[in-house]
Image: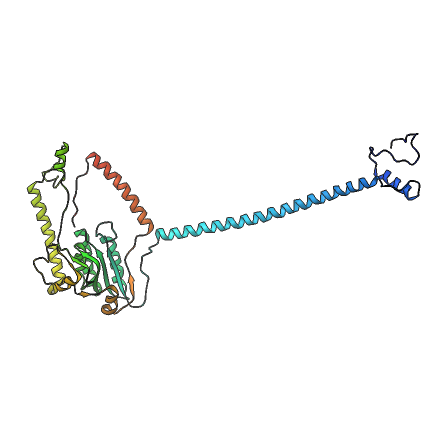
Amino acid sequence: MTPPDPDTPPGTPAPASEPMTVTEAAALAEMRAAGKLPERAAPAATAAPAAGAKAAAAVGVEAAVERLGVQWLAFQRSERRWRLFFRFTWLLITLVLLVLLFGNVGGPTAPTSPHTAMVEVRGEIALGSEASADRLIIGLRDAFADSSAQAVVLRINSPGGSPVQAGIVYDEILRLKALHGKKVYAVVEEICASGAYYIAAAADQIYVDKASLVGSIGVLMDGFGFTGLMDKLGVERRLITAGSNKGMLDPFSPVDPKQQEAAKAMLAQIHQQFISVVQKGRGERLKAGPDTFSGMVWNGEEAVKNGLADGLGSLDFVAREVVKAEEIIDYTPRENVAERLAKRFGAEVGAGAARALHSMGALGSTSPLK
């Protein structure tokens, strides 16, 4: 402690500029209590709050750290819950996509009660389409094989297509009828023309709506000729073939009468095959006239009159009144998402390859049969 100034009266405290120790403050407090010093604010009071403030600050820091830890743990738990939630959500989405990609969403159920089996012929009858022979035959075999199916109904909405695909389906229907001994009924909704009627001819009975379009028993081969346009544009066709008929019906070359007659003879032969199928399927019910096999199309009412159909009726009518099994089960195979994506991707790749080959002159021109 600094010695007191001689000029300073006894008992006078040291200047406030010098900090006091705890011992000095206690001594001063005892002197005041003994009456040796006048009462005044004890300098020790400045140190005591400072010490208390330090202690309070330490407690505050501990509390703040504790709160921060609690909040951090709550955040971690919340983050863990959200992470689990998103993982479960992605798992659910993946499972749904797998079902859509690889599940046969249009497949039939496995009923035990008597029912009417239905197979749908929709759209163009062509290789790779929904109405291709491969796809339709899968549904037909499942429908015939089900012992609970009382009969098989073909629901038809098709303008026709390939005579080859139609012929394959027709033959398979006859085989399955003989194998399982079940009746087959055709129900026409919008249209049953050309190759679609070829398939319908295999049915035991054909039902139509009065406004349905039925018939078109004929064969065609179509295309275009560009020789006149090429002459005007000054474009020369340079076609090199090995075989005198390899470029038959080439749209960029003049029509060869001999090749044209050969094409007509081929169409006439396919047409006669079509006529034979219809005559066999319809039998004495058919009232053939000059236009019956001309490619003419009739409405449903006229089709019943000329024997191309047996009566007016819908799918529900046939199931309820004819088959006597009102429940209808669809056996038509459906494309799943994976098949549609693969087909689209394959079509794009095939179109690109075809364009490349055409640019190289590697592919000839073909015309479809309908």
Q: Can residue 276 be seen in this view?
A: yes
At horizontal 17% and vertical 46% (from top left) the residue drawn is 368
Classify the position of the N terminus by image quarter. top right
Report which quarter residue 158 is drawn in: bottom left
Report which quarter residue 18 is drawn in: top right
Count every numbered label the image shows and give the total: 0
Residue 301, compared with residue 53, is above or below; it is below
Coloration of the structure image: rainbow
State the residue in front, 265 or 140.
265
| Residue 294 position in % (x across, y down) | 10, 55
State the residue in front, 150 or 264.
264
| Residue 166 position in % (x across, y down) | 18, 54
At horizontal 14% and vertical 35% (from top left) the residue drawn is 230
Q: Is residue 239 visible?
A: no
Residue 16, compared with residue 273, is above or below; it is above
> Seen in the image, is 288 located left or right of residue 61?
left
Residue 236, compared with residue 210, is above or below; it is above
Direction top: furthest residue: 6
> Seen in the image, is 43 located left or right of residue 168?
right
| Residue 228 position in % (x across, y down) | 12, 37
At horizontal 90% and vertical 30% (from top left) the residue drawn is 5
| Residue 235 position in % (x across, y down) | 15, 32
> Seen in the image, is 338 located left or right of residue 223?
right
